[in-house]
Each structure stands twice: as C-alpha cells, then as structure tokens.
Image (tube, rainbow, N blue to C red):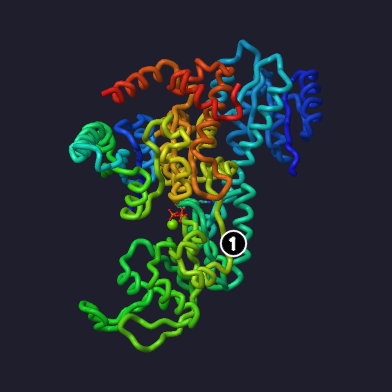
Amino acid sequence: MVQNRILIVDDEAVTRKNLTRLFEREGFSVSSVSTGFEALERLRDSPYDLVITDLVMEDLDGLELLLNIKTRFPNIEVILITGYASIPTAISAVKKGAYHYLEKPIRPEETVHLARQAIEKKRLREQVEQLEALVEKDLNAPTLIGQSSGMVEVLKLIKQVAQVNCNVLITGESGTGKELAASMIHSFSQRRNNNFLAINCGGFAEELLANELFGHEKDAFTGASSARTGLLETASSGTLFLDEIGDMPSSMQAKLLRAIQEQEIIRVGGTHPVPIDVRIISATNQDLKKSLNSGGFRQDLFYRLNVVSVEIPPLRERKDDIPLLANYFLNRTAKRFHREVIGFSDGAMEALKNYYFPGNVRELENIIEHAVALTSDTTIQLKDLPPDLSELDIFSFDQSGNDVMTLKALEQNYIQWVLNRVGRNKTRAARLLGIDRSSLWRHLKGSEFED
Amino acid sequence: MSLKIMILSDSFHLRTEAIRYSIALAKRLDAVLVLLILLPFELTKKTPGSVNTVLKLQTRAADAIRQPISDMERSGVPVESTIRIGNPRSELLKFLAESGKFHSIVWGGGSDSINEKSHWTSNLEADVKYSVLVPFIKPEQESGRRSGRFSQQRRVRKE
Ligand SMILES: Nc1ncnc2c1ncn2[C@@H]1O[C@H](COP(=O)(O)OP(=O)(O)OP(=O)(O)O)[C@@H](O)[C@H]1O
Ligand SMILES: [Mg+2]
C-alpha cells in the first residue's frame, strides 16, 4: 500500500512537533515547514497527498497558500487549522477548495479521521481521472468500471476469456452492464477489427428473428424483393451478441444450435449452406438453469453457448463501486453539459451507498445525470437526489438462490431493526410500524426473538 | 422496448410509499407501470349472488385505484391497470404468463398482511422469477407524518 504523505505548515514549533508525532504514529509519512513559501517549495520538489496548514501566518497566510496550491497543484487536498476568531475565514476557504478546517485546540482523533478522508477523496479522484484518460485514449474501447473484489474478478475473467475463441454466456440482473461486458470481450479479442453486432432475442416475433439471424433469399416470402444477409453471416470473423437469449423461441433454439454445430447457416427460403465463423456471446437476466429443467431452454444449446460463463454481481452486492461509478458519471455528465460540478456531499454519497438499486448501474447513471443537471451547487447535495433515496427503505424477497429470505423473515428482520432503534420499546415500535401493539405482539410471538 | 414495473396489491388499498417508489423508479428506468389488483375470492355453488359480489368488488376496486392512477399519470409515467378476482396466486401466475417480462414488482398491498404464514404471498419467490420490492418509510423520517397516513389507511379499509 502507498504511504499517505502529509505536509504540515505552521509557524509554531510545538504544533508542528505534535502533529508530526500524531501522524507518524498513525503510519503517515510526514514533513513539516514553518512558512507558506517553504511549503510551496517542498510541494514543487516532492509529491504530497495533503497539506495541513495554519490559517494565520506571517507573509503568506493559510488562505493565500491554499489558493496557490489549488492553482499549481490542484490534486493536493488542504486542511486549515484555525482559532475560533477566524472560523468565518476558514469557511470561505472551504468554498475556495479547502477540504475542511480544524478548530483549535486540535483533537487528535478528529484530525486523523479528517486527514484520512481527504486523502481517500484525492485517491478516488485520481482513479477516476486515470479511467477517463484510458477511455479517452481509445474512445471506442468499452470499459466496465469497478474496483470491488467482485468486479475485479469479472474484469480478469473478461480479459482471459477474450483471448480464447469460445462462446460466452453473461448473466446478471438488468442494468449490470452485460452488453458493455460483451463489447469489452470483443474489443480485447483477436476479432476486434471485425464486426460486433447485437440483437435482442426477446424483441422480435419468431419469423422476424429468423430473418434477422439467418437472412433470406430473394422471394423467400411476400415482400422479399431482394436477398439479405443475416446477422450470423454479417458477424462472420467477428462477434454476435445475443441479448435476452432466454426469450428465444424453441424452434429458433433448434436452428441456432444447428448453425453453431455445423458452422454454417441456410438463409430463409434458401437451399445452400453458407459457412460462418462467428463468436457468440449471449446474455440473460433469467436463471437459464431453471428453464433447462422446466423445458423452456434446450440443454444442448445451453452447453454450446455457455462454454464460459461470466456472472456480473448486482450493484447492491458491490457497494464499493458506487463512489467510483458515481464520480465517473458525474465527471462525464458535467463535461458534456459544461457544468462546474466536482463531487458529492457526504450525505449524498451516503444515500447513494445505502440505496438498493434494483435497476443497477443503469439506475445510478440516470440518477447522477439528473442530479448534475439539477444542482445549483458545485457538489451534489442530498436534495439533488431523488427524495425516495433518503425517505424509503427497500426490502426485497427474490429468487436468486436458496439463501433468500422469505417476506416473513424480512418482516421479522425489519421489526427487530425498528425495535432496536427505539430501545425495544414495543409501544413506540408499533407506532413506527403503523400497527397496534397486539399485532406487533402477534408478529413477535412467532419469532425466536420474542422477549 | 420500455421496461415494465408492476405494482401489486391484494386489497383496495395501495400503500402511498409503494406508489411513490414505483413512480420514482419508473422515471429513472424509463419504464411503464402496470398496476395489478388481485382480489381474493372463492366462487362456491353455495354462495348466493356470487356474480353480484364479483361485480361489486370490481367496481369498488376500480373506484379505489382511480386516484393513484391519476397520480401516476400526472407524474408523466404511463400506466395500465388490471383487476383480477379469484385465487390471487394463480391469478398472478396467469397474468405473468400473459404479459411477458417485468423489470421488477413493487408490493403495494398492506404491510402486515404479507407477514402471516398463511398469506398467499408466502414463499412466492418459488413461483415468481422476479424480485419483489417492498418499500417502507425510514423510521427516522417518521414523527407525526405516520399517524396521519395510517389513520387514512384505516378509513379506506373500514369503508
Ligand atoms: N461497470 C460499468 N461501468 C460503466 N458503465 C456501466 C457499467 N455497468 C453498466 N454501465 C452502464 O449502464 C448502462 C446499462 O448497461 P448494459 O446495457 O450493459 O446493461 P445490461 O446488463 O445489458 O442490462 P439489460 O439486462 O437491462 O439489457 C449502460 O449505459 C452502461 O454503459
Ligand atoms: Mg442489455
């Protein structure tokens, strides 16, 4: 891990010594200087993450130092130390880009906590900038963004599987980035200079889908005035993305299986087989294995498509990605609309991290785009986010495995949670839950938590 | 193709937070709303005037959802509604089979009824392949507001 580098600026030797000792004990790498001019010299010569400076100093004061740092080293965070009398100045400094201010006398815990937060913010911003640089370098390269352990695994798998010329099945809830993942696999593969074509198998009637996939000969049906190649043919040497594969009608499943096995297709109304060489990446947000058992999806086709499977976890199971994605969407939108919006208030970020996101990344993207358009601030505030994020709790019972809770269990958890919040006062809990005491008692009677 | 979000209830009452949340979610996902009211009713030979009862239930339900529907429409989200009377579980499964895919289902019915073991939604996840979302008002958001909402709920139920 990189060591956090702090520069302390204060004209009082005692403060410098105390702060240095405090941060060194916490494992930071610390330097200190006694004037603003010296500070600027240090910053020019070596890299720092954070400057903690006294506000009132001779020559160059903390505010002037801040402005200098923000123009010359915009990535370095600044925290000001101030006496009670200069708090208004400190507040205006925060508006000018300081991370925060600390009031004297200094409380060690608060100081270290704030410093950690400031550095974390700087690191996050740098990560987003790196990502943007990557994306900008190759505008056509699709990139799934994520740093959670779940996403790091997915990205590793995507890069590995891209090199192998096999069919891939991508699963994940709606909005988790399945299509993006598919185009990423294509762009990392040997086929990257050929076509990447996509079709939604759920969006077409059966005949139309056949026509799209296999093409048709002239006069194959009324209105077919000329021959047309299908996607399987056009995507040859490239990649074909079959979205919502679970919705493919069974007659079409048989035809697709044949095409994959024989590596050739016959156009609708045609007789001659046409050879194809296409990599198929399919996606579904259903549990295809379940459909195998119930006969909804052909097992033989499933194994042909699912040579390797990539499973993208829902956003609620990788909350670590939320700040990164949110900042990425914020920067992108701010740039697009030429708005000066640079980040999120703590409250806003907290609300985002706590939300359930049934619509996954697609929903987050939409929320951020709206917030950037709406805000009158340079940082997104809680009030710029949809009110339901802070006013409602979303519970869910879903079918994603055996470890799901029944609604009954969820309700029990909820009741216990409310009870804990009100110090297990049943009258208050019942009032909060909107039920009367006797029905609360009934709910509790069935549970092991009864008390 | 627009995504579809279902609001599901088994009573005349739709919880306000469920309506609010469905509207907000639909806006964010550019989805349309489908309101499904399932009124439990068992037709037996012995019940005299069953047809009348069914008709009455139908009318009452249609009256009860008029306001929520107009709220949804006013907020700019397209909404369709269906009232089914019978065994709620099988009516739901039939409806899902007829109507194709949904993005998610928001539970709009009462919050204590679903608690009971004998309730028709218990173990629903075995049959329905969607996650069912149940929005609650956060406890810290409460104070005062809740009592008003719930007295309103009681009034609706007593009618
Ligand atoms: N990890 C990610 N990084 C950046 N953008 C993402 C990420 N995941 C999803 N997105 C964005 O979210 C949106 C939805 O992604 P995508 O269409 O790939 O999802 P999907 O899984 O195919 O959804 P559906 O099942 O509804 O078709 C897109 O705009 C996509 O660019
Ligand atoms: Mg998709």
Q: Residue at x 41, y 76 (%)?
A: A255
Amino acid type of disc 1?
Ile
Residue A228 percent location from the top left of the image: 32, 79
Query: Is residue A195 found left or right of A322 in the rendered image?
Result: left
Q: Nearer the viewer, residue B80 or B95?
A: B95
Q: Nearer the viewer, residue A211 or A70?
A: A211
Q: Is residue B36 above or below residue A101?
A: below
Q: How many marks?
A: 1
- Where is mark 1, residue-wise? A158
Residue B140 percent location from the top left of the image: 49, 22
CA neighbours of label 1 inside 10 A, class few (<14), some (14 to 19), many (20+): many
Q: Secondary structure at mark 1?
A: helix
Report if residue A139 is visible in the image.
Answer: no
Mark 1 chain:
A
Query: Is residue A353 found left or right of A22 in the rendered image?
Result: left
Query: Is residue A313 found left or right of A257 in the rendered image?
Result: right
Residue A174 percent location from the top left of the image: 45, 52
In the picture, residue A435 is in which quadrant?
top left
Quadrant (top left/top right/bottom left/bottom right) for the N terminus of chain B: bottom left
Q: Is residue B44 above or below residue A100?
A: below
Q: Nearer the viewer, residue A296 or B66?
A: A296
Report if residue A134 is visible in the image.
Answer: yes
Quadrant (top left/top right/bottom left/bottom right) for the C terminus of chain B: top left
